[in-house]
Image (cartoon, grey):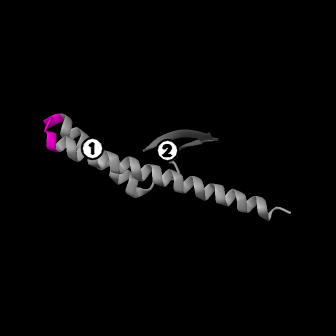
Amino acid sequence: MSAVVTFFVKGGDFAYMLKCYQTRKTNPWMTRNLLLLLRKRHSLYKRWRRSQNPVHKQLYNKIRNLVQRKIQVAKNRTSNHITKMTELALLKQP
């Protein structure tokens, strides 16, 4: 999600508009595939809530559990990577 921030700058006999785009900072473990899975999970949740169909609930629960597992794996992988990089940086220091 991004937001547009508009500034008006005056300089002498002229003024101009400057636009800056602010983007939401994402977590390093949040990949494109995870975002797609989250979107899919949300759409299945909405489908189940509208229909109250047990089949839709089962499908939603399967995807929900899959997404939770993938997020946990991605967080652990990122955490391990950061830890290894920190250890390597400390070892390289004289």
- Assess disc 1: are there few (<14), some (14-19) or many (≥20) residues with their C-alpha within 10 Å of its C-alpha: some
Q: Where are the magenta residues, as a range?
A: 50-55
Left or right side of 93 for 83: left
Where does the image place residue 77, in percent across and percent down from the top left? Answer: 53, 57
Q: Nearer the viewer, residue 5 or 68?
A: 68
On residue 61, the disc is 1
Dividing the picture into quadrants, the one containing residue 80 is bottom right
On residue 72, the disc is none
On residue 24, the disc is 2
Element type where label 2 sits in the image: loop
Instruction: Quarter of the image for the C terminus: give it.
Output: bottom right
Left or right side of 68 for 56: left
- Assess disc 2: are there few (<14), some (14-19) or many (≥20) residues with their C-alpha within 10 Å of its C-alpha: few
Residue at (60% x, 59% y) in the render: 81
58 drawn magenta: no
Which badge, 1 or 2, comes first in the chain's sequence?
Answer: 2
